[in-house]
Amino acid sequence: MSTLYDNLGGAAAVDLAVDKFYEKVLADERVQHFFAHTNMQQQKQHQKAFMTYAFGGAKHWDGRPMRDAHKELVAEMGLTDSHFDAIAENLIATLVELEVPQPLIDEVVQIVGSTSHRNDVLNR
């Protein structure tokens, strides 16, 4: 049985999507300030590893839990639902630009845009 990771195109597709996604995020005035002091090379590698895991391409996640990873952004920088939505919009736009079929985009959104994921990121 193939995974979403496989159906998206594996490592090469995730790498390309993450790179294009961060181009959009860094150009987005709604959210770019959250990355002003971020090592973007490290951030991209981290995001690639997370998406690989979230989409079924890896069995283990070695990164921090979402709550821990975003706690400071919520407390000190005011990360809110509107920022979460902006990030999701940029991800969807990236997948559309890469001509990912809509059913696969829907699967991605279901995983990364779930209420539980949103609540973890926003520390609720």
Image (cartoon, rainbow, N blue to C red):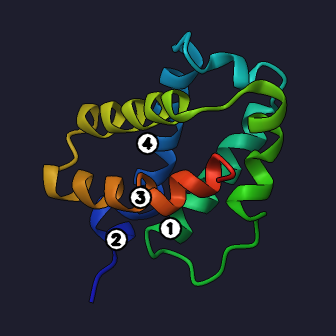
CA–CA distance in space, label 3 to label 1: 12 Å
Q: Of residues 53 and 71, which is closer to you in this image?
A: 71
Of mark 2 and mark 1, the one earlier in the sequence is 2
- The residue identified by callout 1 is 54
Local crowd size for mark 4, using a 10 Å CA cut-off: few (<14), some (14–19), many (≥20): some
Residue at horizontal 23 percent and vertical 55 percent from the top: 106
CA–CA distance in space, label 2 to label 1: 12 Å
Give the foreground label among 3 and 4: 3
Place of residue 97 in the rendered image (x, y in percent of width and height, measured from the top left): 26, 31
Element type where label 4 sits in the image: helix
Give the foreground label among 3 and 1: 3
- The residue identified by callout 4 is 17
Q: Is residue 25 left or right of residue 100?
A: right
Q: In this view, does 72 lie to the left or right of 88?
A: right
Kindly identify the amino acid type of the residue bearing the numbered disc 1.
Ala
Kindly identify the amino acid type of the residue bearing the numbered disc 3.
Ser
Q: In this view, does 58 lie to the left or right of 77?
A: left
Of mark 3 and mark 1, the one earlier in the sequence is 1
Query: From the viewer's perspective, is residue 12 above or below residue 80?
Result: below
CA–CA distance in space, label 2 to label 3: 21 Å
CA–CA distance in space, label 2 to label 4: 14 Å
Residue that extends furthest to the left in the rendered view of this protein:
102
Of mark 3 and mark 4, the one earlier in the sequence is 4
Element type where label 1 sits in the image: helix
Place of residue 88 in the rendered image (x, y in percent of width and height, measured from the top left): 42, 38
Picture quarter with the N terminus: bottom left
- Please give the label number shown on residue 109: none
Q: Is the C-beta separation of discs 3 and 4 under 8 Å?
A: no
Local crowd size for mark 1, using a 10 Å CA cut-off: few (<14), some (14–19), many (≥20): some
Residue at horizontal 77 percent and vertical 18 percent from the top: 36
- The residue identified by callout 3 is 114
Q: Is the C-beta separation of discs 2 and 3 under 8 Å?
A: no
